[in-house]
Structures are given as C-alpha cells and as structure tokens.
C-alpha cells in the first residue's frame, strides 16, 4: 500500500468518522472496519469499482455495518445503479441509520430509476435541516414535473426557495416547469433569477441552452451545453443534449464522441444507445445500428412499465426504439400513452401516425394525424403521411389534396409524386397513374419502385413493348436485383421471347433457388409451350415446399383448365381460397371462375365472406356487385356500386357501370 500523506490521512479519518459514527464501537468487526477504510481510500483515489469491492467484502464480514451500506449506496448512485443503491439505503435504514444521512441519496436513487411516485409517496421533506429539506423539495419538484403535475411541482420548488433562497436549484426547477409547458417567457424570468444568485453555475448555463434548444436555435444551445461540459465534463444531461444538437446540425463526428463518452459513463442509458444507432445508420452501418437499437431496447425492457410511463422522455424513446426495430405493437402502446400526455405535440403524433400506418390501421392514423395538421399545416412529411393514410382508407380525393400540397412544399418530390400515382391507381385512374409514374421514372430512373410499378401496369394493359422498354432500363441499372430480373423475365415471357425469359429466370433461380415467383414463371413457360404434365410436375413439387400458396394453386387450376378438367380446376381454386381466407386475390379469382361456370350463388357466398373481411376494398365490391347481377339481385348490386362510387370519390368508370344498370 502506498504511504498516505499526513494531511490526506487526517482527511480520510474525518470521512470515515462522518460516514460511520459506529465504526469504533466495540461490536464492530475489526477486519470489516479495515475493509471500510480501504474503500474510503479507494474512493478518494477515484477507484470507485475497487471501493465497491472493499465495501462488499466488509459487509460479508459484518452485514449490519450501517456506514458500509450507506457508502456502498452512494457509490452505486455514482455508477448509475439506482436499484442497487436503493437496496443499500433501505438496508441501512432498517438497521437504524440516521435518516438525515440516507434520505437525500434514497430520493436520488428513486429518481435514477424514474420511480417518481415512490419518491413522492415515501420521502417526506420535513423534520430535517433547512438545507436537506430544501433539497428534498427540489427532488420532489422534479418528480412532479416528470409526472406533469405542474402545480405540485411549482409548490415544491417554492418551498425549496423559502428554505434555501441562496440556491439556484429552486428557480431553475421553476424554469424547467415553464419550459416543459412551452412558456418560454416565464422560464426566462426564473433563469434570470438563478443568474442573479450564481451566474457561473453550470446548471444555469444548461437551462439557458435548453431554452435556445426549445426555440430551435441550435448554435446557441450547443454553445451553452459546451460551456457546461467544459466546467463539468461528466454532466450527463448536457452531454445528451449536446449530442442531439450536434446530430441535428449534421456534426456527426463530434456527436459520436459525446455518445461514446456517455456510454462509458453510463452503459445503461438507452438515449445514448439510440443516438449511437442513429449515427451508425447515417454511416450506412446497418448491422451496427441494429445492434445499438437492440441494446437500447434491452435497457428499456429492463425498466418497469410504470417507470417508463411515469418518465415522459423514456416513454417517447421507448416508442422510437420499438418503431425503429419494427415492433409496431409495442411502439403503438408507448406512443399512444405519450400522445395522451402531450396531445399538442405534432412530432409525437407523426410518429404514432406512422406506426398506425405500418399496422394498416388507417382510420386510426387519420384520427391521430389530422390534429397535428392544424398545428403544422405546411409540414410536407405530415401531408405525405396523411395522404398515404387517406389513400389506403379509400379517401382518394383527400389523399390527392394532401399529396398536391406536399409537392408544393417538400423537396422529396419524386417520393411524393410516386405516392400520388399510387393514390390515382387505388382510385381506379390507371391512365393518370401511368402518366404520373412515367414522369417520375423519366426524371429519376434510379426510382426502382416507380419503374417496377409502371412496367406491371403496362403489362396489365398489354402495352408489352413499353413494359419491356422499362424493364430493360431497370436491368441495366440493377443487374443484380432479383426482383427486377424476375420482372424482366415475366415481361419477356409476355412478349413471347421464351428463350430470353428462361435465361433470366435461370439466373434468378441460380442466386435464389426458392424464389417462388421465379419458379412459377418457369412453370408458366411450360404451360405456354403446352408441356402441361411437365408444368404440373413443377408446380406440385413447388407446392410441397409452399403448401399454402394461392399463386401456385391458381397455376395448377390453369393447367387443369387447359386439360379440360374443370372439376380439378375448381378444386384448386377452392383450396386456394380456403387456405387463404383473407386473400382478396384468391377470393376474386374463385368468384370469376364461378361466374364463368354459371355458379352465381357460390360466387355471392364467397363475395359476401371476403367483403366482411375487407368492407371497403373496391376490387372486392366490384366482384360482389357483378355476382349479385349474375344472380338477378339488381337492387343489391346497385347498392354495392353506389358504395363503390362514394369510396372511389365518384370515379367516372364506376359511375358509368351504375348508369348501365
């Protein structure tokens, strides 16, 4: 052991005496006392982990050692291990510790775990020195602020100011309350009050930075956060806030340095893990980004649900992390709770709306997003999102209005126009959709989605030369994209160029042997060449690997029809629909078969079932309406077509069908 300097040694003794008034008592284990002394020295030398080990050893020798429990709790607090700290302070209290030594750190342990209700219900700020009581009121004020109990928070901070008027903590607490409510003038007032007490307190600078941050003045916010960190290099709130500001300004290298430091100081901080994921994603490090997201998710999952719900920043972060991982049910749960707390927050509404769109809950998404539009009416991303929800909810006129506004405001014009084309297509305006997609693709031939959809539409309209022109361009730009290669093969097959189609299909299958669409296309070639037994053999082998595929069964039905075996064709189509009761394609294909074979009542039965599952799908309603017509139910068919016209916003093609009835 190093020799301790006389002054230092006296200081150590004083610290020991402070932390352990019972250490010299006759019933104290001497060896435990020695371990405690070693812990004090290690703590003074900045060796926190070594100090913790010494204290654990002391407690193994004497588990009733009050001072060791208290000091161990404080070291756990310093290591951001609030749960372990809470355990030690409660043990010390149970052994009869002086509550004035444990009450503040116990409150801080609750705070570190976001256990705000426990702090409020179990910690009483009376009966202590003025300084201790003031600190407890500060902690309770912060807890009430996190719980959005702003009146209680203000009352607690005012009590703290009465007890300790020379501290900046009370005014800064009030500033935080008003800042959280968006009352920036009031926040400024209390920041100035804190400055009059101590203008050089880092927490004053931090609050000044927070106000600039709220105003969107990122440069000034960064300046104040940096000032805090220069004074207190381990100020976690300033490090986290500055990292966010740096990311927003595109200063990713500097942000990464802050995040690395935060993760070293507190590996269990989910905010740092999330920021790390964001930065790694910007670097195109998808694997690293996902790993960081999974780490953030694991930290969040380790928190109690009550703690997350009580701590608004963690609640929003939990939603962000779960959304980023594609865990939309969990994201929806967290974000719904956040929006209930902060209904005026448009950013939270956008994230919840996006989650609901991913879950295909379009009406719910509309209900969440429309209030946000009243707050930020010129946010092109919100307009695009709301347009997408309207489109899938069959509100095509409203969708078109949103996309048109977004085009005027946004800089992602290709994406918005692509969505506008999808809306036109969903509304039944195929020609308009083709024109829009053609413009998108001609302006930006790297837009694969537009090119693929345009080619498919040309194939459906039997404009095969145009389809082949598009797929040829796509193949040149994406020679290794299997979706593009398979689509090009389909287009070649439709054009009758079987040799070239087979060449591309074999290329696709060599890279991905189990790609079902490519295998089906090979079977289609056999059907085209009238090699029906070979096609049936191919399809049966494929069906063994994909027993529920309606696409394979539909091709088997085609083979049976070409053989003249209508009964077997019907069997395959019925089986496809039975195996896929939610599939619109399986149901409509079977309905068409029934109608072609004078089995109208069966078509109606299938149509009514699929309509109950997809009540606003135009394709389903069209097939059902035709089935009613075939069975002589003219008025019922008219009713269906009228509902179709309303959903399609009076599409002229659908109105023409009604007029003919």
Image: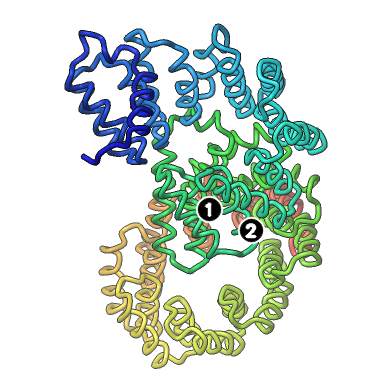
- Left or right: residue 324 versus residue 44 is right
Q: Rate crowding at label 2 as few (under 14), some (14 to 19) or many (20 or more) other CA atoms within 10 Å.
A: few
| Mark positioned earlier in the residue sequence (2 or 1) | 2
- Left or right: residue 306 versus residue 460 is left
Q: Quadrant of the N terminus?
A: top left
Q: How many marks?
A: 2
Location of residue 250 (image quadrant)? bottom right
Q: Which mark is residue 248?
A: 2
* Residue 573 position in % (x across, y down): 41, 60
- Identified at 63% across, 54% down, the residue is 245
- Left or right: residue 402 versus residue 105 is right
Front-most of 14 and 181? 14
* Residue 8 position in % (x across, y down): 36, 34
Q: Rate crowding at label 1 as few (under 14), some (14 to 19) or many (20 or more) other CA atoms within 10 Å.
A: many
Which residue position holds label 1? 603
* In the rendered image, the vertical position of residue 503 relative to residue 42, given as above or below: below
Front-most of 260 and 461? 260
Determine the residue located farthest toward the front in the rendered image: 6
Q: Is residue 315 visible?
A: yes
């Amino acid at each position: 052991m190093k020799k301790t300097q006389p002054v230092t040694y006296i200081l150590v003794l004083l610290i020991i005496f402070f932390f352990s008034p019972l250490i010299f008592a006759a019933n104290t284990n001497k060896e435990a006392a020695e371990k405690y002394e070693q812990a004090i020295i290690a703590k003074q030398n900045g060796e926190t982990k070594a100090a913790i080990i010494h204290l654990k050893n002391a407690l193994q020798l004497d588990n009733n050692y009050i001072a060791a429990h208290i000091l161990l709790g404080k070291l756990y607090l310093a290591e951001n291990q609030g749960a372990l700290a809470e355990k030690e302070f409660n043990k010390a209290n149970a052994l009869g510790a002086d509550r004035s030594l444990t009450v503040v750190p116990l409150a801080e342990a609750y705070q570190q775990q976001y256990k705000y209700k426990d702090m409020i219900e179990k910690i009483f700020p009376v009966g202590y020195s003025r300084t201790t009581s003031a600190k407890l009121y500060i902690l309770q004020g912060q807890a009430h602020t996190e719980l959005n109990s702003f009146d209680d928070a203000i009352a607690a901070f005012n009590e703290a100011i009465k007890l300790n008027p020379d501290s900046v903590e009370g005014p800064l607490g009030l500033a935080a309350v008003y800042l959280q409510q968006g009352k920036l003038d009031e926040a400024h007032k209390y920041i100035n009050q804190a400055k009059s007490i101590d203008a050089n307190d880092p927490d004053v600078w931090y609050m000044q930075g927070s106000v600039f941050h709220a105003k969107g003045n990122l440069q000034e916010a960064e300046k104040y956060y940096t000032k805090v960190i220069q004074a207190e290099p381990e100020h976690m709130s300033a490090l986290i806030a500055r990292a966010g500001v740096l990311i927003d300004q595109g200063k990713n290298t500097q942000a990464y340095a802050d995040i690395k430091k935060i993760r070293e100081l507190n590996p269990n901080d989910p905010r740092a893990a999330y920021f790390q994921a964001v930065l790694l994603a910007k670097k195109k490090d998808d694997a690293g980004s996902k790993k960081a997201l999974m780490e953030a998710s694991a930290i969040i999952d380790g928190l109690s649900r009550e703690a997350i719900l009580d701590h608004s920043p963690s609640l929003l972060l939990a939603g962000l992390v779960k959304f980023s991982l594609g865990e939309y049910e969990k994201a929806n749960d967290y974000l719904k709770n956040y929006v209930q707390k902060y209904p005026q927050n448009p950013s939270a509404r956008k994230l919840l709306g996006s989650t609901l769109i991913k879950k295909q809950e379009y009406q719910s998404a509309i209900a969440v997003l429309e209030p946000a539009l009243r707050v930020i009416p010129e946010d092109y991303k919100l307009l695009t999102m709301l347009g997408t929800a309207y489109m899938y909810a069959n509100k095509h006129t409203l969708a078109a209005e949103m996309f048109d506004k977004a085009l005027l405001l946004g800089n992602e014009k290709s994406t918005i126009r692509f969505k506008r084309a999808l809306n036109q297509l969903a509304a039944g305006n195929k020609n308009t959709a083709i024109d829009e997609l053609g413009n998108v693709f001609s302006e930006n031939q790297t837009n694969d989605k537009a090119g693929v959809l345009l080619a498919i539409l040309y194939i459906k309209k039997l404009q095969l030369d145009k389809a082949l022109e598009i797929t040829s361009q796509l193949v040149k730009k994406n020679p290794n994209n299997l979706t593009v290669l398979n689509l090009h093969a389909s287009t070649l097959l439709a054009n009758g160029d079987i040799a070239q189609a087979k060449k591309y299909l074999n290329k696709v299958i060599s890279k991905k042997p189990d790609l079902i669409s490519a295998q089906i296309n090979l079977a289609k070639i056999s059907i085209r060449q009238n090699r029906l037994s070979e096609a049936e053999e191919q399809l049966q082998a494929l069906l063994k690997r994909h027993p529920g595929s309606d696409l394979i069964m539909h091709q088997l039905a085609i083979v049976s029809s070409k053989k003249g075996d209508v009964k077997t064709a019907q069997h395959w189509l019925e089986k496809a629909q039975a195996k896929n009761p939610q599939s619109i394609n399986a149901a409509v294909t079977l309905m068409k078969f029934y109608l072609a074979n004078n089995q109208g009542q069966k078509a109606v039965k299938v149509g009514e079932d699929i309509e109950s599952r997809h009540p606003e799908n135009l394709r389903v309603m069209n097939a059902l309406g035709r089935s009613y017509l075939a069975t002589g139910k003219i008025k019922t068919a008219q009713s269906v077509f009228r509902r179709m016209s309303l959903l399609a916003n009076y599409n002229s093609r659908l109105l023409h069908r009604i007029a003919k009835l």
